[in-house]
Image: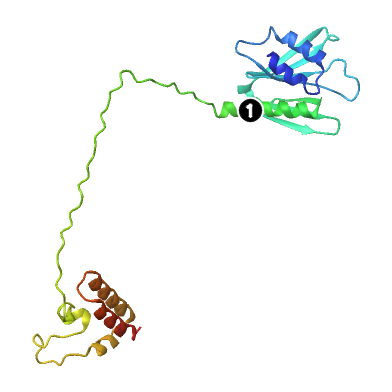
């Protein structure tokens, strides 16, 4: 608590007023309750008996002097009962206002602007903690952990059987009739074979591109030679 009060006194606080309030709060604080901030009124004229606001981690406490300062009235509201808080700054200071869930509104005026901002920030933090509580999950240590032996996984290499391809000297032997446009005279004895150029000229652009892809696959598989592929490619490109 002393460390928090040192931070408060570094700002524009009246040490005597803070000391007086804290001395009366000693018997009012609950267990595990800590003072977060104290704001004291500072009216334009001389303020003999200023009101003050004390915020703790459990509630807001309004401190109002009575009987010429001989007694003090304390009004407190738990954070669970607080609905919202507001700050309105003016020329001569700032007003700190908070509303409760029972539609009660309290305003403490003529607070120094810096103190009102600190008060508002602390109130927002407490309200956020209520809306989004931080749950500390206990860490459960495993008793007698079972030791696991790493298993080495050996992947079998894919065995690719190489097939020796024979050199093809006649391209007409490997191109299907439907794709190449060539006709076998033994298969169609009564029809005259169609020339390769006429067959290419009758194909669409998509079919020509498919034919180029077929030639490239034949070259990659070693079924035709580079020279023959270049010749076939050049003939197809004439019609694209």
Rendered location of residue 33, percent (x, y): 63, 14
In the rendered image, the residue lying farthest to the right is 45
Asked whether the viewer can see residue 101, the reply is no
Please tell me whether residue 145 is drawn above or below residue 219 in the rendered image: above
Q: Which residue is at 26% across, 32% downward? A: 150
Please tell me whether residue 151 is drawn above or below residue 104 in the rendered image: below
Look at mark 1 in the image and give the residue it sits on: 125
Q: Which residue is at 14% across, 79% downward? A: 173
User: The C terminus is located in which quarter?
Assistant: bottom left
Secondary structure found at label 1: helix
Occupied quadrant, residue 166 = bottom left
Q: How is the image coloured?
A: rainbow
Q: Is residue 134 left or right of residue 38?
A: left
- Circle 1 packing at 10 Å, graded few (<14), some (14-19), many (20+), is few
All told, the count of numbered labels is 1
User: The N terminus is located in which quarter?
Assistant: top right
Rendered location of residue 101, percent (x, y): 64, 26
Please tell me whether residue 10 is drawn above or below residue 89 in the rendered image: above
Q: Is residue 145 left or right of residue 125?
A: left
143, 165: nearer the viewer: 165
Q: Is residue 118 left or right of residue 239?
A: right
């Amino acid at each position: 608590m002393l460390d928090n009060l040192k931070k408060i006194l570094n700002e524009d606080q009246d040490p005597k007023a803070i000391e007086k309030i804290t001395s009366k709060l000693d018997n009012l604080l609950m267990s595990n309750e800590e003072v977060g901030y104290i704001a004291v009124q500072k009216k334009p004229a001389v303020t003999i008996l200023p009101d003050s606001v004390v915020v703790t981690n459990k509630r807001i406490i309004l401190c109002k002097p009575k009987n010429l300062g001989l007694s003090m009235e304390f009004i407190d509201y738990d954070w669970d009962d607080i609905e919202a808080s507001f700050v309105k700054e003016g020329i001569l200071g700032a007003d700190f206002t908070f509303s409760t869930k029972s539609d009660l509104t309290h305003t403490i005026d003529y607070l120094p602007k810096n103190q009102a901002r600190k008060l508002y920030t602390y109130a927002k933090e407490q309200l956020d903690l209520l809306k989004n509580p931080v749950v500390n999950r206990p860490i459960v240590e495993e008793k007698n952990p079972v030791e696991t032996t790493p298993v080495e996984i050996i992947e079998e290499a894919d065995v690719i059987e190489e097939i020796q391809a024979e050199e093809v000297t006649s391209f007409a032997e490997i191109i299907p009739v439907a794709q190449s446009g060539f006709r076998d005279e033994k298969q169609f004895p009564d029809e005259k074979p169609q020339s390769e150029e006429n067959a290419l000229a009758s194909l669409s652009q998509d079919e020509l591109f498919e034919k180029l892809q077929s030639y490239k696959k034949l070259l990659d598989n070693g079924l035709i030679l580079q020279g023959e592929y270049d010749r076939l490619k050049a003939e197809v490109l004439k019609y694209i």
